[in-house]
Amino acid sequence: MNLSLLSSLSVHNLAAVLDGRQDCVLGGSLIALPAKVTEAFAWPQQRLRAALPGLAEDSINELWLADTPCQSGESAGLRWRRSASVLFGVIELDESEFPPREGSSPLQDASAEAYRRIFSLLDSQQLPHLWRVWNYLAEINAETAGLERYRQFNIGRQDSFLEFRRGATGNVPAACALGVAGGPLSIAFMAGAHPAVPVENPRQVSAYNYPTEYGPRSPIFSRAVLVYPPGQEILFISGTASIVGHQTVHPGDLVGQCRESVANISAVLDEANRLACSAPFVLSELSYRIYIRHAADLARVRDALPALIGVEAAVVFVQADICRLDLLIEIEAFASHPRGVADGQPEK
């Protein structure tokens, strides 16, 4: 099996790019603002209500493509596809369906329920290992029910991890959590038959060990993971920001935060390469999704990036709110290497 990412695809040229391979699409995302009503695709599609600064297009698609036809399904409102030992799914839950109750909030309950359904699906499909998660919610920095909404989300997420006897520290998936311009709680995820290898950053406290000043429950994600579909070694780097130890650095300084975020990604690459069994991963080969809080900051980020990651790196810019109010930018990344007998490692 070979899994690849097709990025920055226009809605209008999907058919030409896929050229009859629609059955091989594992899943993907549509990024658009205003939210677009498009044809119903056969694959699970996460819809991000977010602007694309600097693009002439007001919407793009990103697709995960396998090299064999995929099996599709739907379970408890969760759409999914799998190809052999890899599964991609999407769930959207409207918070209005969860009435307020004492000691909780609609977002907390929606988050817990979303992850319950995800874990139940993975158990039923016998693909128990969660590799990568993309979480998006409206007004992530707003305070409701006496608590910031991102912190409410973290409580619900951890409740389900513990309920399904999944560790909340150590071997946890790569992930991001961003604020978008309205809409339901939206979660996309990739999972597989084999465990991910977690990668942490020596410059940072692991997110799941953050002190309580950042909320009653810590976020649950690894800084990155290495995963092993047959014949591949894939690196997923979580949303990465200007945090050293557990504290935000360079508050108010966009370029400083951009440089610090890339320094953190570089440190993660060093750790990943220490654990990897394919050729070393390098900054210039990664595919990046870069979230900026303010669209007006795009030019300054674009000017700073070539010296940091190279001029050839593939980058998609998305306007979104970051999980801390003092953060202006967050960067996630992906890369894939082939594996074979020459790697000197058995298939996992």
Image: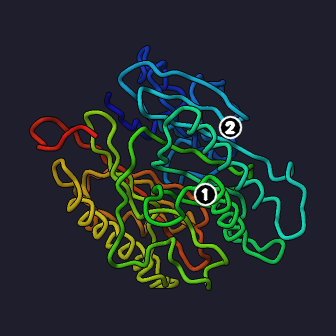
Residue appearing at x 35%, y 71% in the figure: 201
State whether residue 173 is above or below residue 234: below
Above or below: residue 286 compared with residue 266? above
Looking at the picture, does residue 258 appear above or below residue 276? below
Residue 12 rendering spot, x and y as whole percentages? 53, 26
Q: Residue at x 82, y 64 (%)?
A: 105
Q: Secondary structure at mark 2?
A: loop
- How many numbered discs, if any? 2
Q: Which residue is mark 1?
A: 161
The picture places residue 84, in percent across and down from the top left corner, at 41, 26
Q: Residues within 10 Å of mark 2 (few under 14, many from 20)?
A: some
Task: Say which amino acid is labelled 2.
Answer: Lys
Instruction: Left or right? Give the position of 45 relative to 18.
Output: right
Instruction: Work out which quarter of the rendered image holds the N terminus and state it.
Output: top left
**Which is nearer the eye, 210 or 48?**
210
Q: Residue at x 25, y 51 (%)?
A: 285
Q: Earlier in the sequence, mark 2 or mark 1?
A: 2
In the picture as drawn, the residue positioned furthest to the front comes out as 165
Q: Residue at point 30% right, 33% down?
A: 230
Q: Work out whether 291 lies above or below 81.
A: below
